[in-house]
Image (cartoon, rainbow, N blue to C red):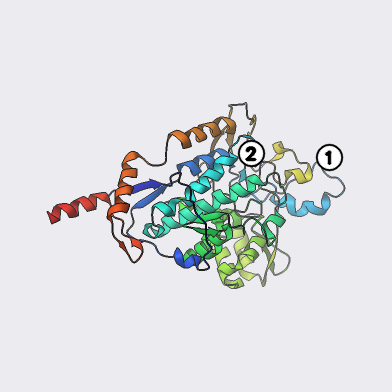
Amino acid sequence: MKKIVIAASLLFALGKAQANPELGEHFNEYNEQSKIVVNYDDVNQLLSMAVLETGMSDRKVMELSNSSNRTGTKLRSNRGRKTAYEANRFLFKQVKNSELEPLIGRMRIDLQSLPDQVDLRELGKDEQLAYWLNLYTVGALEKLVANYPKYDLEDEILDDDNYFEEKFITITGQNISLNDIKNHIVFKNHGNNPVVLYGFYQGNIGSPSINPMAYTSENVFKSLGYLAREFINSNRGVIPGRGDSVKVSMFYEQNMALFNNDMEKLRKHLLDYAKYDIKGPLTVAEELDFDIEAWSMADLDGSLREFGGNISTNNAALLNAVVGLNKDDKNIMAFGEGEFGGGEAANLGYLSSQMQDGYVNFGRFSPEMAEYLSKMKGKYKVREGKVEIKDLADKVDEDKKNQ
């Protein structure tokens, strides 16, 4: 049976949105037999242009130059220096300057309209997970780019009125937030596998890295597994402490609900992805201390600005050969290699115009797929509020048998 490939079209959700306290219940069904696949080529193109992969951490600490070893710097340097070369970076400034910002907002509106076209309950479970993680990522980037430059994100992440709590996403008439997607949809429906935690990038160095590609049903768990290993085995995730303690990221403290507030469940999860150098300390530790924090924005400079560090000193391939990036330059730049083989990013001003043209001229559905979806909605019966979706070939076979 051929897989059906669909994509979110540029349909704008109209009408007054309403909150739903049982949000997770509304999105907790899926179709194990589904052959529907969502296309995220636009998200993939954005991430391939604007994400710099740093690869696995080598746990190296930034060395302060004499010029940066100034009064006031030492008070913050010990924590920040350990994480300065870690975490994938997003080119926030370059995206802002290249006029990609409004396009990200259009992507988010585009993605949130998908349930208006195809009942999410007809997607497979992994396909649903990929959808929610992509919608979350695009929504987070929309807010982070809009608020750039904001280099310290602690308040934006921890305050009660932070933009992760803002209900700016509309799904089938319901206003939801980024944290709603995380806590009330993904954690509720996929929380039996805590690796989903690493799909919730927050924009700061101390959160899991942004994935350098769009999630799909086929790559979602491979991607999340890599992000888990990278985070846990870095200075941002787990560091052996003194005595019988191990330091772990405050990101876990934020998300202990995923582990039912059970520290032993967290320990087991960390051990599942830990390398040998921290597996022993994690096993024998009497305490796990939420003592690692890194609130600097994971942008091109990251925590380097805190210490006056030079970008060229990054021996962890943070910005390997990143040169000549500006609106008028069409140079190609190479960047660090990661799990997925690294990549290239071209001048964002040039490519953003291509992406914008693509949205206008390329469209989101082929004429054949648009016609098929139209017929599917019109002909299939609605039973108990659920649309029965089948492959067109199956429908033709059934019609022949009934003749």
Secondary element under disc 2, as helix, strand or loop, is: helix
Q: Using a 10 Å C-alpha cutoff, classify the residue at mark 1 as few (fewer than 14 neighbours), some (14 to 19) or many (20 or more).
A: few
Badge 1 amino acid: Ser
Q: Tags 1 and 2 in contact by the CB under 8 Å rule? A: no
Within the image, what quadrant is residue 183 found in? bottom right
Badge 2 amino acid: Lys
Within the image, what quadrant is residue 198 found in? bottom right
Q: Earlier in the sequence, mark 1 or mark 2?
A: 1
Identify the residue at image location x=38%, y=53%: 118
Residue 396 horizontal/vertical position (percent)? 20, 50
Work out which residue is located at the far right of the displayed protein and give it. Answer: 71
Q: CA distance from mark 1 to mark 2?
A: 30 Å
Identify the residue at image location x=32%, y=59%: 33
- Which residue does the numbered mark 2 point to in the structure image? 96
- Which residue does the numbered mark 1 point to in the structure image? 67
Q: Nearer the viewer, residue 90 or 400?
A: 400
